Image: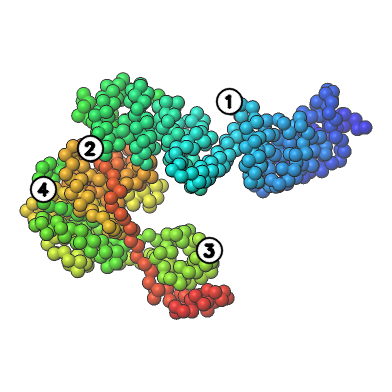
Amino acid sequence: MMDYEEVLKNRQEVLDLVNAGNIQEAFSRLIECSYTCPEDNSQHSAAIKAIQEQIIEGLIRLTSDQNYREIFIILNRLISFFGLSHRLCLEIGLLNLSRKIDLDFQIQFLKSLPPEILNDPIIQIIQAETLRLTNNPAAACTIYNSLPPRESWWPFDPLWESLTQGLTKYLLEINTKFLHRQATNSTGWHMEPHALNALIAGLIRPNSGNANDFRHHIERIMWHTPVPNTDVGGLTVAFLATHITDLDPDRAAIVFHLAVSFEKRHEIDLILQKEEFIVTKLAYHPLFIKYFDIFSQKNLSYRDKFNDILDIFLKSSFCKNFVEGDMKAFNFSALFSTNVWATEVLSRYRKRLPLQSIRGVPFLAQPRHAIFPKVGGESHLFIGIFGQMRDPRGSFSKVMEYLYKDTQDWRAKGKTVSIGISTWDQTGQKKIEDGSPTSEFAHRVPEPIKKILTEHHIHTLAELRNLLPSTAEAIQKASYSNETVSLELLHEIAQSCGFDSSDIFINISTENQYMDDIGREFRAFYKNAGSGVENQARMWHRIAGLYDLTHQATERKGAAIGTMALIRPDVLFENSSISNLATTTAAETSAPTAVCDFDPQACWIEGVGDRYFAGSAQAVARAFDAKDLILQIIRDPALSELYHDRPFWHRFAQTVFYESDVFLQSSTAIHMRFLRQNIDLNVLKAALKADYEQTTNENIKKLIQDHI
């Protein structure tokens, strides 16, 4: 029998080599000492086992994307030297699960373990998760249900969460199938819409992490937990609304924001019925106040209740301290944007504040457009088209044709229609890059290219380039092409669609004008924001350009503008009337009202749909202020720190309209289709011919041959 001192020396040498990162040398040194640690409790045996535990820990610590298989093999071979220990079995199982090395082997390995190891709760969780991942969720569920109750499985919480969520998805799917089958077999019986609500508890961990993590946790459940024939998102909102009083104010406000974003009226009512919780908790939270306000602007029957809650908020010590300049007044909230929401609410209701301001933080300016009357102007409709032209003679012509037909009844009644166009001197379209997915450009390429993309399962332009290099290059170049936009061209298109030249008002801007007006300052402030964010500045620059056109239209027509719509030149409305929507919205008497497209995803990121705005001219004209308000934010140190992310994507439209005295509602009444310039086959023929001559793929040759 080997001397204990010699074994200890060997194990220490192995540990030193592992700690030095010399994995193979360490294992070779271990093999030299053919000793298996006995299952006794002697002092010598305990000392050896302690070092062996450290060796296992060291190997796990060294595991990487490059060597995880090597580590896995070594861990399994360690059983021959260290014996079958709980720790070794645990690490083998966890590594196999995390890297999914050989789960079938794991099933057999776990079955072979002695009961004293196999029945350990953590090993049981590993076995259940392995069974779930190998398509045996029923067996996994049996083990899961036999586990002892614990408040925490730390440090194995991620494994527990993965197992719980996976089994929840399985139970949702299996119960959905069962209930649908029962409904099919039972006359007059139907599945209750919330029958599966309780199962959602398996997906939600309301107390894990902080409140900001909770928001992302909900997103993962709603958009990354697909269950066939099951509205996981709807069930999630319903479950959270039912258990709203179990949440702290931050998480409860997030749930209310979620319900408002997706217009879950039933769930909103469930929350608002918890009056004591509302009055004692949520009434002080700026996020709840803001989204209750937004909801009540569209649902006016809730307006009185909102005003009662708003009164509690404005009179609270939190609010009073914040108005005095205490930026930590709402420190009960851990959410990143609490002070932003508080400022937005107080800005909207500034007239109810003692000094109509917050000490140290200016409100966004409130320009008043006197040319748009509070009363009157109903006979003059102004439709403003803003943004970059994609294809003037194609997509823009279709938009103008639609507008002429849509306003025929208006003109037939002797009313006035003015069309304003605020665009750029160059056309532009979504550029097709190597990383562009085919879903973004397949509809723009000719039929033979579409067939090649489909039949050869091509996912990006880069993949097409590997197959047809010349054609891919030609497609990319065609997507970069620009055309000059002129007054003459736009008037010609408008007249060809039926409009009189006197009805058309045009503002064409250049890149230099944009840079002088806002572009240079915007880029200097948002240095690393990227083109997507800067496109917002460009959009608001062109919307601002419409303001002068409304002046021209008012003077030329001799009539104030009372109704207005702002639309894009690349969005076509179908089977719906933008002029009727604008007229109906303008007739609202509770407040000057505008309406935009319903976009729940935009609302969830604190924005609104920005594909159109329509309604009272006085309300819609608030959009004309946005460019100058962005500059106000950039130039003011306090505002730029607070509102740094407000001009991103859909957010600024909400901020601009909310911080005013108008109502902004959303609508699903308008059906839209985006128009993109198609790439003509003739543009690609030379490239297709070049690829035809170099490819050896007979299927592709046949597809190309018929078109060159």
Q: Earlier in the sequence, mark 1 or mark 2?
A: 1
**Colouring of the image:** rainbow
Q: Residue at x 87, y 29 (%)?
A: 5
CA distance for labels 2 and 3? 50 Å
The local crowd at label 1, few if under 14, some if 14 to 19, many if 20 or more residues have their Cα within 10 Å, is few
Does 654 sit left or right of 178 as displayed? left
The single residue placed furthest to the top in the displayed view is: 317
The residue that label 2 is drawn on is: 660
Q: Pointer 1 and pointer 3: residues touching (CB < 8 Å)? A: no
Q: Earlier in the sequence, mark 1 or mark 3?
A: 1
The residue that label 4 is drawn on is: 377
Q: Nearer the viewer, mark 1 or mark 2?
A: 1
Which percent across, then down, holds residue 581? 22, 50
CA distance for labels 1 and 3? 48 Å
> Is 685 drawn above or below residue 217 in the view shown?
below
Q: Pointer 4 and pointer 3: residues touching (CB < 8 Å)? A: no
CA distance for labels 2 and 4? 21 Å
Task: Kindly identify the amino acid type of the residue bearing the numbered disc 2.
Answer: Ser
Does 270 sit left or right of 7 as displayed? left
Q: Pointer 2 and pointer 3: residues touching (CB < 8 Å)? A: no
Task: Kindly identify the amino acid type of the residue bearing the numbered disc 3.
Answer: His
Q: Earlier in the sequence, mark 4 or mark 3?
A: 4
The residue that label 3 is drawn on is: 457
CA distance for labels 4 and 3? 56 Å
Q: Nearer the viewer, mark 2 or mark 4?
A: 4
The residue that label 1 is drawn on is: 151
Task: Kindly identify the amino acid type of the residue bearing the numbered disc 4.
Answer: Gly
CA distance for labels 1 and 4? 65 Å
The quarter of the picture where residue 68 lies is: top right
Which percent across, then down, holds residue 584? 19, 47
As helix, strand or loop, the secondary structure at mark 2 comes to loop
